[in-house]
Amino acid sequence: MSDFLKKLKGVFVVDDGSQTEEKPQPEPAKATPVVTATRTVSASVTGNVSEKFTDILLQAMERNNQEGFDYIEYKRSLQTLEKMPMDEKTRYFSAFAAAQSMGISQQKLIESAGFYLNILQVEQKQFNAATNGQREKQVGGKENAIKSLEKFIQEKGELIAKLTQEIQQHQTQMEAMKTEIQEAVLKIETTMQDFNASFTNLEAQINTDVEKMKTYLK
């Protein structure tokens, strides 16, 4: 990790929450001649702010760091002033005074914050596209396979006496695929929610700073 990234991590608050989701348990296979598979419901998970994804987002900000004094340097100044006995408005204005000495206006600071928000939003779009691709790759094919098996099992069910054993074998395969889908969906949803929580956390901090800059830096 570069020194710049370490410093950048230091000025943004990262929650250290954790949440363990209970893994859905597959229904046991039933030894019946005719079987209708239940459609797998997408797992519902709540994302947590993740150090991994926060690092990815901050690395994107680092790669696109603007030269000279901008929002990031202003954010660092705010962090330094937190140790001083002053209220929030005074802290924001004091940090702004340093920026003004370098020819930085309130508008430039806000535009700089907006620039980094755009960087984060680009990362979010790229991440969502990649995640959707993985979802289709890991889940879509198995769902189509289950549909085929459902039809196949229904047809075999008409030949109860002759094909009972074969249907049971296909049912076992189908239940195994459903379990794999549930696990894959849970993993993908957890990953997406962790990313979105990390994104929302950083986005909220920047937006809060923007509103405070608008309020205080007049």
Image: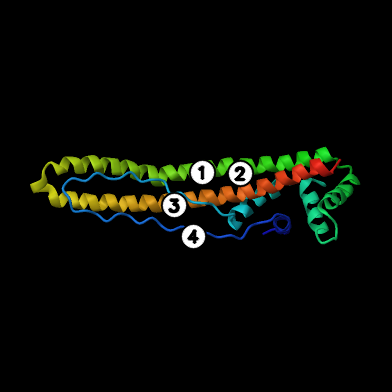
Q: Which residue is mark 1?
A: 130
Q: Secondary structure at mark 3?
A: helix
Q: Secondary structure at mark 4?
A: loop
Q: Is residue 158 left or right of residue 4?
A: left
Q: Mark 2 and mark 1: span between their CA atoms?
A: 11 Å
The C terminus, quarter of image? top right
Report if the CB atoms under discs 3 and 1 are less than 8 Å apart: no
Q: Secondary structure at mark 2?
A: helix
Name the front one of labels 2 and 3. 3
Which label's residue is closer to the chain start, 2 or 4? Answer: 4
Residue drawn where x is 36% and y is 52% of the image? 180
Give the label on residue 123, or none.
Answer: 2
Residue 66 shows in the view? no
Q: Mark 2 and mark 4: span between their CA atoms?
A: 26 Å
Residue type at mark 2?
Glu
Q: Which residue is mark 4?
A: 20
Which label's residue is closer to the chain start, 2 or 1? Answer: 2
Q: Mark 1 and mark 4: span between their CA atoms?
A: 24 Å
- Mark 4: give few (<14), some (14-19) or many (20+) Cα within 10 Å: few
Residue 146 shows in the view? yes
Q: Which residue is mark 3?
A: 186
